[in-house]
Amino acid sequence: PVILGIESSCDETSAAVCVDGVMLSNVIANQTIHEAYGGVVPELASRVHQQNIVPAVQQALSNAKVNKNDIDAVAFTRGPGLLGSLLVGVSFAKAFALAKNLPLIEINHMQAHILAHFIAEDKPSFPFLCLTVSGGHTQIVLVKDYFDMEIIGQTLDDAAGEAMDKTSKILGLPYPGGPLIDKNARLGNPEAYKFPEPQIPGFDFSFSGLKTSILYFIRDNIAADPDFIQKNLADICASVEKRIASILLNKLQKAAMQYNIKDIALAGGVSANTGLRQGLLEMGAKNGWKCFIPKFEYCTDNAAMIAIAGYYKYLKGEFADQHIAPMARMPF
Ligand code: ATP
Ligand code: MG
Ligand code: FE
């Protein structure tokens, strides 16, 4: 089947075309308007989605050399995400499906981040564990089947991506800060400064204490030397990145041991992080894991992951109807 995938949950407008499980295109329109505000402004995001959605779909079809009359189903992100942003993608998908008399397939964005691994040749085998780390979520997921997933651990407060973005804000870097922390960390010493590892039971996470300790650390050092950040930016980024990665990976290791699972995957925007990717590979080598790390274009938000998830739902014959509405919060 030819599946058109649509993603608009946050600030990326994306369209992808997948034919029999093979990804032929993945067009991602990033929104730059939010940079000036230090975070995503929901109302602006939905307006830009409205401008970008039709050109993104046209580009995805033309890159894939697929005619719109050849599409067999439209898969779209139903949630979770910003309601106004989701509404644009959901409305587009419904209108397109209605006009072309096509079935609709609803997709959970967080499941899709995980299912992005099935775009690659080398796919994880069930059951596997996935550490999903993004701007809004931090989860350890036991993936038993394509759509049978159990969250065994999650953050009690901030997400890992939020910890990255808030740290970069404290350091005076623009939004989104995760990629900038990564870039600066490459030039720094990860052992330069020690930040605390929270003691949370089970497989859950907490990042709010880390955020506060970074804030106080910077405040105290700036009081002694106003140029502290400029002089030590690389070391600060490297040390923060190392701590965030170790908090994530230590819990993942604990879960892998308890569930006795050796296929381990990373997903979500923060899985683009160099330190986390390297850390997983090192931990995997020690534990005999088979590690799965997505290609960069499938880490942050994209419609390819929606299209591949749509492909597997199409095979199961699970379709949505025209009355479907987006969901800002959406369980698995
Ligand atoms: P969710 O998927 O939870 O709804 P989201 O869609 O906004 O949230 P993603 O697009 O998956 O999240 O990921 C965005 C996050 O990834 C941001 O917090 C961003 O800073 C972070 N990020 C992206 N690249 C990197 C990187 N190289 N290093 C660290 N963080 C990164
Ligand atoms: Mg984004
Ligand atoms: Fe996402």
Image (tube, helix red, strand yellow):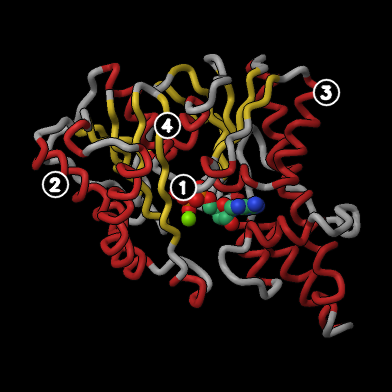
Q: Please name the residue shown 63% across and 70% down the image.
A: 169
The numbered mark, 2 or 3, whose residue comes first in the sequence reads 2
Q: Which residue is mark 1?
A: 301
For image coordinates 32% across by 37% down, the residue present is: 65
Name the one closer to the observer, 161 or 13: 13
In the image, 68: left or right of 283? left
Amino acid type, mark 1:
Asp
Query: Which mark, residue 286?
Result: 3
In the rendered image, residue 20, in percent from the top left (x then y), is placed at 35, 21
Instruction: First in sequence, mark 2 or 4: give its number.
Output: 4
For label 1, being within 8 Å of ligand 1 is answered yes
Residue at horizontal 29%, vertical 56%? 55
Residue at mark 2: 95
**Alpha carbon distance from label 1 to label 4:** 15 Å
Taking 68 as reference, is 36 left or right?
right
Cα–Cα gap, marks 1 and 2:
23 Å
Earlier residue among tags 1 and 4: 4
Residue 186 percent location from the top left of the image: 80, 55
**Residue nearest the viewer, comparing 38 with 4:** 4
Check whether the beta carbons of the residues at disc 3 and disc 1 lie within 8 A of each other. no
